[in-house]
Amino acid sequence: MHCSWKAVILLALVFVAVQYALIRSITSENYSSCSDTQRCCDVKQMSSKKNHILILAATRSGSSFFGQLFNQHPDVFYLYEPLNHVQTALNSTNDNRQVILGASRDILRGLFTCNLHLLESYINPVPENHMTDAVKRRGASKALCTPPVCDAFSSSMVNISEEECLQECGYLNLTLASVSCQQRHNVVMKTVRVPVVSVIRDLLEDPRLNLKVIQLVRDPRGIVASRMMTFPEKYPMMRLWKMKGQKPRNLGFTKIPVCEDFLSSVSTGLSQPSWLRGKYMLVRYEDLAQNPLTKTQEIFAYLGISLHQHVVDWIQENTEAKGVWSPMEVFSTKRDSAANSEGWRLKLSFGMVEYLQTVCQAVLQKLGYKRVRSSGELTNLSYSLVEDMKISFQ
Ligand SMILES: *[C@@H]1O[C@H](CO)[C@@H](O)[C@H](O)[C@H]1NC(C)=O
Ligand SMILES: *[C@@H]1O[C@H](CO)[C@@H](O)[C@H](O)[C@H]1NC(C)=O
Ligand SMILES: *[C@@H]1O[C@H](CO)[C@@H](O)[C@H](O)[C@H]1NC(C)=O
Ligand SMILES: *[C@@H]1O[C@H](CO)[C@@H](O)[C@H](O)[C@H]1NC(C)=O
Ligand SMILES: *[C@@H]1O[C@H](CO)[C@@H](O)[C@H](O)[C@H]1NC(C)=O
């Protein structure tokens, strides 16, 4: 179905008028959801109050774990890193960041309207008859492992492992995935591939989407410490520093992308431009780690999603007895009692931390992370580096 902008605006106006009339007469009219899997201009679909939520994160900021909080909710259609396919496919042919980000934004728009077929041009190998076994981390998405997509598990099961999903569910039928998406009232996606919130301004301004953004950040010193171990090729100088125990001579004060991106994006978010007002929430990983349940309640309330018992159960099952949350494995959310959100303080030398603090000074201050002034302070884990943050959403 072709959807022109004029039609959309007209329909939106009609909808406002219709809804006004409905509210006036207190009618409990029901709106069936649109049955067409393609993008559709149906007034009924726009009127259904679906929540669309994008989690913006950075690698090694605890985002897999964070995404799982949403994934446990039976009325959430969750996709883990859908842009992975897009950016991998585009990167080999075109290195232009703007082009890739523009394409990513358009794909997100389509995915939020439940057109999963859009991914087909990017999945390798190309799906046949809308069937594929090449969706990355399919098992991280419960909706892709339960009915109507897969009958092997019931959606009330709390702990379907990714391996079990792949074994039992076979090829993924993307048409059924689209149907599953349409059936749920909340569509949530998580991505580390959108560096700053301004990239998706168009989506936030799109009246059909009712989109909200959660920006998940973490102390950049912790992110770098973690990335150095997981992606050593990206931080050769820091690796060298750690191995040799002294600063490499040719290491200047080069910018660290994650600090630049956080600073830019969070500054935009907290400055409350009109296109973002009421649609942006900043979440610090450390606050979640400290108080997973309370923080999750706060976030779900902001988004207008009920805190389903499955979510509560999952938090309880995946956090330490003392409530400290420690998801540290690269591509897993399993808890690891040896590490926690401040484990980096024992892994980096004071010199390295001082270096990072200098390069990332502005963003540390913006996000309320304290500088450490001595190696004693660094390794004294009873001394918190996380300041209270009052205003994190609007
Ligand atoms: C909802 O819509 C269906 C189909 O139009 C109709 O059969 C049903 O009675 C409606 N339910 C309510 C509560 O209005
Ligand atoms: C894109 O390609 C460049 C080199 O061509 C590589 O360094 C980079 O990691 C790639 N990015 C992604 C997201 O695959
Ligand atoms: C999932 O939960 C059920 C019951 O709560 C338990 O019997 C089963 O061992 C769990 N499976 C995994 C993989 O943890
Ligand atoms: C995928 O699901 C759709 C919708 O139920 C169905 O019509 C189609 O036959 C399925 N495709 C395959 C290859 O089973
Ligand atoms: C560690 O920090 C706490 C809290 O600031 C402080 O009371 C304590 O004296 C510190 N311990 C050492 C050994 O410096």
Image (tube, rainbow, N blue to C red):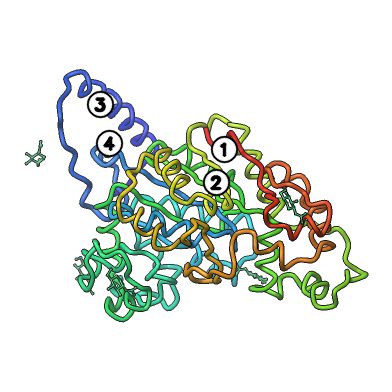
Whether residue 82 is visible here, answered yes or no, is no
Q: Mark 1 or 3, which is nearer the eye?
A: 1
Q: Which residue is mark 2?
A: 283
Q: Amino acid at mark 4?
A: Ser
Label 2 crowd (10 A; few <14 / some 14-19 / many >=20): many
- The disc placed on residue 19 is 3
Residue type highlighted by circle 2: Val
- What amino acid is labelled 3 in the image? Gln
Residue that numbered label 1 is attached to: 392
Q: CA distance from mark 2 to mark 3?
A: 33 Å
Q: Is residue 134 visible?
A: yes
Q: Are marks 4 and 3 in contact (CB under 8 Å)?
A: yes
Which is nearer the N-term, disc 2 or disc 1? 2
At horizontal 53% and vertical 36% (from top left) the residue drawn is 393
**Is residue 236 or residue 32 the one in the foreground?**
236
In the structure shown, which secondary structural element does the residue marked by tag 2 occupy?
A: strand
Q: Residues within 10 Å of mark 3 (few under 14, many from 20)?
A: some
Instruction: Say which residue label 4 marks.
Output: 47
Q: Contact, CB < 8 Å: mark 2 with mark 1?
A: yes
Q: Is residue 243 above or below residue 196?
A: below
| Side of 21 where 70 appears, left or right | right
For mark 1, give the secondary structure. Answer: loop
Relative depth, front residue between 351 and 68:
351
Residue 18 as seen in the image, left or right of residue 5? left
Counting residues from the start of the chain, the first of labels 1 and 3 encountered is 3
